[in-house]
């Protein structure tokens, strides 16, 4: 799995002109699923991200996790994280097919909710407009293949 995690002061996703998910302080997570990914990989990634310490403490150091910061999560499915960029026109054959990707996308969100977080989301496969106000900016890339 691949995830681009951005610390945000706000983020939202809009589909067909309607906001379908929005958060204030927290993480905007662009999540891609690969063909070899499993539930165990998904669970481990959710744990890592939910415990990531990138929020500032009283001394201004990135030392607090999402729970300590009182943050929420907005997850947007992003198969393009598996783009093959060996030519000018990217190919997406390295991304998982929907029959694997959708359940793992849903499981990832469930794992975050099970840890007590408010989780908002887009819609798998939809044409989405994503807006965010990056905080920092702080952006972390997770790739479970490495």
Image (spheres, helix red, strand yellow):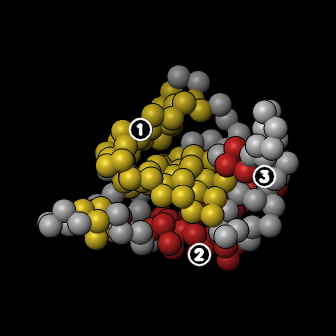
Whether label 1 touches label 2, CB < 8 Å: no
62 lies above or below 22: below
Kindly give the residue lying farthest to the top in the view shown. 17
Disc nearer the start of the sequence (3/1): 3
Residue in view at x 78 percent, y 38 percent: 90
**Of helix, strand and loop, which one carries label 3?**
loop
**Of helix, strand and loop, which one carries label 1?**
strand
Residue 85 image offset from top left, x and y in percent: 76, 43
Residue in view at x 45 percent, y 34 percent: 131
Residue 76 image offset from top left, x and y in percent: 57, 46
Q: Quadrant of residue 143?
A: bottom right
In 3D space, how far apart are the residues under numbered discs 1 and 2 (Cα atoms)?
26 Å
Disc nearer the start of the sequence (2/3): 2
In 3D space, how far apart are the residues under numbered discs 2 and 3 (Cα atoms)?
19 Å
Residue 83 image offset from top left, x and y in percent: 74, 46
85 lies above or below 99: above
Residue at which label 1 appears: 132
Quadrant into which the C terminus falls: bottom right
* Disc sitting over residue 95 in the figure: 3
Disc nearer the start of the sequence (1/2): 2
Query: Quick one: label 2, few (<14), some, or many (20+) residues within 10 Å?
Result: some
Residue at which label 2 appears: 44
Quadrant into which the N terminus falls: bottom right
In 3D space, how far apart are the residues under numbered discs 3 and 1 (Cα atoms)?
25 Å
Whether label 3 touches label 1, CB < 8 Å: no
Residue in view at x 80 percent, y 67 percent: 36
Q: Quadrant of residue 127?
A: top right
Q: Nearer the viewer, residue 87 or 131?
A: 87
**Of helix, strand and loop, which one carries label 2?**
helix
Residue 14 image offset from top left, x and y in percent: 52, 31
* Disc sitting over residue 92 in the figure: none
């Amino acid at each position: 799995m691949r995830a681009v995690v951005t610390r945000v002061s706000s983020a939202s996703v809009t589909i067909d002109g309607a906001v379908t998910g929005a958060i204030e302080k927290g993480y905007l997570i662009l999540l891609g699923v690969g063909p070899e990914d499993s539930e165990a990989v998904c669970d481990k990634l959710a744990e890592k991200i939910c415990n990531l310490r990138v929020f500032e403490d009283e001394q201004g150091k990135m030392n607090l996790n999402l729970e300590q910061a009182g943050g929420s999560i907005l997850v947007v499915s992003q198969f393009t994280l598996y783009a093959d960029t060996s030519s000018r026109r990217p190919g997406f054959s390295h991304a998982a097919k929907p029959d694997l990707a959708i359940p793992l996308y849903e499981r990832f969100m469930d794992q975050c909710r099970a840890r007590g977080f408010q989780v908002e989301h887009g819609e798998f496969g939809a044409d989405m407009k994503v807006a965010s106000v990056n905080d920092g900016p702080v952006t972390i890339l997770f790739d479970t293949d490495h």
